[in-house]
Image (cartoon, grey):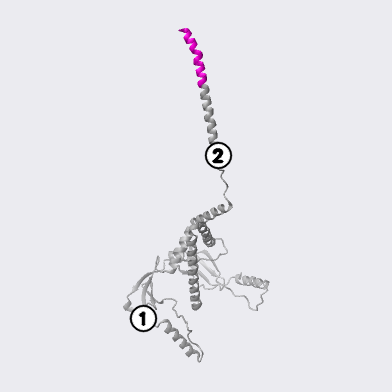
Amino acid sequence: MRSNVSELKPAMATTTKASEQVESESASSKSAEGERSQDSANAASPKRRPRRLSSRLMMLARRTHLYAGLFLLPWVFLYGITGAMFNHQGLFPRIDFRPVPADVIRSEMDRFPTPESMAAEVVESIKSAKGDIALSLAESHQAEFTNDVMFEINVDGKKRVVHLDPIAKTAQLATHPPEDFKPEHRLSDVKNIRLESKPLDIARSAAKQAIDHAGLKSNADPRPFGWTKLNFLAMLNDEPVRITYVLKDGHVDVMTFDGQPDMPARGFFLRLHTTHGQPPHWNGRMIWSLFVDAMAIAMVTWGATGLLMWWQIKRTRLIGGIVMLASVLVAAAVYFAVFGFYARTML
């Protein structure tokens, strides 16, 4: 029995060694297969190439298009809404427009002359006033009224304006609310003052030097152009006032000051739309003018980057080209129509 056990031990040891050798070989085989698999995967996936310059520029154009629009979004809304407000007085109105029944004014407006008949009457009146002159309507005279015929009255402290459409022969009655901000004149007996420093004369002398330097000869002194003003705050009898001094003629206004602009909210936003030019001081208006410049640059940038992004999408090139051609034709037609209107009316 003992001899059998002793005989079995070497056999078991041999079997164990063989098993360990098989497992070692199997692990080595798996490791080699794993390495080969990794090498194969690395060989299958090429290295990531850096983007071309054109791709990076297109990405920059897209990001500029996006973030410029997001940053300037308040100005986009402001110019869009206030532009519509300029075009339509009834949009966000302070003024109450009410139509007048057509039969109220029909008897009179039916007698109102047409643009053509009024133009002919004007020509005849000029000829009668001037004498024998060769004046006649052009073959294509294009007589047009520029706007409604309007009349105003003041009732109960409110301004009422009647708008008469000379073509449609209709009317509206507009009620203007009282002014929310109406500063009072103080020291109304002081109209014009003269300053000992004579700033206008100093500026005129500097203007002469600039004109002489440019080689321009004139016997007349340069005349003031525009209405440069000096605005500042002061205290009058312990009350805040705003003083405005006009350099051109020495006119001065002393007004009460309550920290509010002399216009309603609607007027303020419309004024923002039309504010232009840079003052000589760094203030709110100067900062606003910089954002106006930014909006001008951004609008050109949006157009340019929009064209680039459109061109990248090949399937939209044909339709986009047709749309752009139509846009150019419509814009040209409107341009020449408005150009002709202003050439005739001199507004």
Return the x and y of residue 44 as percentages of the image width and height: 54, 41
Q: Is 243 drawn above or below residue 132 in the view shown?
A: above
Disc ID at residue 323:
none
In the image, what residue type sits under mark 1?
Met
Q: SS class of the residue under badge 1? A: helix
Q: CA distance from mark 1 to mark 2?
A: 89 Å
Q: Residues within 10 Å of mark 2 (few under 14, many from 20)?
A: few
Magenta span has 220? no
**Magenta residues?**
1-19
Q: Which residue is mark 2?
A: 42
Decide which of 19, 180 is in the foreground and name it.
Answer: 19
In the image, what residue type sits under mark 2?
Asn
Left or right relative to 198: residue 331:
left
Which quadrant, please, contains the N terminus? top left
| Residue at point 51%, 27% (across, down) | 26
Prevailing secondary structure class for the magenta stretch in the rendered image: helix
- Disc 1 vs disc 2: which is toward the camera? 2
Q: Which residue is mark 1?
A: 109
| Residue at point 55%, 39% (across, down) | 42
| Residue at point 52%, 55% (across, down) | 62
